[in-house]
Structure formats: C-alpha cells, structure tokens
Image: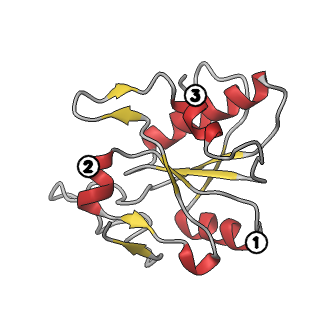
Amino acid sequence: MTNGDASTPVGELLPNDAWELLVQEPDSVLIDVRTRAEWGFVGVPDIAELGKSTVFVEWSQYPNMSINPRFAAEVIEQFEGKMPSHLPVICRSGARSLNAAYAVSDHLSQAGVTVPCINVAEGFEGDLDPAGHRGSLNGWKFRGLAWRQS
C-alpha cells in the first residue's frame, strides 16, 4: 500500500526525534524494513542501551526488490499479541519506510487496532550528497545515533 492509497494517518519524525520517542515511550518498537543485505553490509540501529531490540522485516525482498506480500502480517507476528504503543519505521532514506508504515497502519486499522505508525524521515543512511554518496547529509548514522555492524 502506498501513502496515496492509505486510509489511516502516518506520522513522520526526524531520526533524533524518533530516538527520543523510543526513550520516552517504553513500549515503542523500532521496525527496520531494509533488506537483509543492507542490515548485513551497512549496519543496523542499535537501541540496546534503551533495553530494546529492533524488529527486522523486509519491505522489499532482495534481490528483485519485490514488495513482501506478508509484510504487515510478519510485523504484527513479531509482537506475539502484545501491541507496542508506537511503531517508528526506518529504511535507508525514508521512502520505503513511509510505504511500510502505511501498510502496517492500514493492517492494524482493519483489525480495529490503533497504534501510531511513524516514518523515520531521512532513514538510516540519509539522502544522496552531490557526489552520489549517502551518510554525509543526514540520516540516523550521520546524526550520531547508536548503530552497529551486524
């Protein structure tokens, strides 16, 4: 589902504000929707100091980047019946995570469940700079938030 088709609202926060949400809302859960290759080669958000673990579910499946048809269901399965208070969603630059946040929000809405789904603008690596590289303009890593190589 794309944001143009979505029936439920999705918020948006910059990475530092998403971190603060994770700090302030003990039952919030960060969802990383990048591919396994990205998690392995680029690194992952590290929220262990908050006593939390990131949930990893691919929105687009590598290598053909087709949308995961079970994405929303796979995300919900991670919670084993105990829904989080908020769901910030992150990808590389904020585009896939926006669509993924809408998909989860719509899935929950259809089930009669309300959980704020929030796109992490700028994503993990941020936008491309003039040289075509990520990580030098914005994003989770650029802003100095905790991350690790997986």
The local crowd at label 1, few if under 14, some if 14 to 19, many if 20 or more residues have their Cα within 10 Å, is few
Q: Residue at x 73, y 31 (%)?
A: 108
Q: Are the residues flagged by discs 2 and 3 in contact, CB closer than 8 Å?
A: no
Question: How far apart, in angstroms, are the residues tagged by discs 1 and 3?
Answer: 27 Å
Q: Nearer the viewer, mark 2 or mark 1?
A: 2
Q: Circle 1 — which element?
A: helix
Q: Earlier in the sequence, mark 2 or mark 1?
A: 1
Gap in angstroms between the C-alphas marked 2 and 3: 25 Å
Q: Is residue 89 above or below residue 14?
A: above
Asked whether, in this view, residue 36 is left or right of residue 4, the answer is left
Quadrant of the rendered structure where residue 42 is?
bottom left
- Which residue is identified by label 1? 24
Residue type, numbered disc 2 = Ala
Q: Which residue is mark 3?
A: 3
> Image point 41% across, 73% down: which residue?
147
Task: List x then y, in percent, for residue 33.
Answer: 45, 45
Closest to the observer, 146 or 17: 146
CA neighbours of label 2 inside 10 A, class few (<14), some (14 to 19), many (20+): few
Q: Position of residue 9 (x, y in %)?
A: 72, 35
> In screen coordinates, is 148 left or right of 103?
left
Q: Is residue 16 left or right of residue 83?
A: left
Quarter location, residue 126 = bottom left
First in sequence: mark 2 or mark 3?
A: 3
The residue lying at 47 percent from left, 43 percent from top is: 57
Q: Is residue 43 above or below residue 8?
A: below
Q: Quadrant of the N terminus?
A: top right
Which residue bears the numbered disc 2? 37
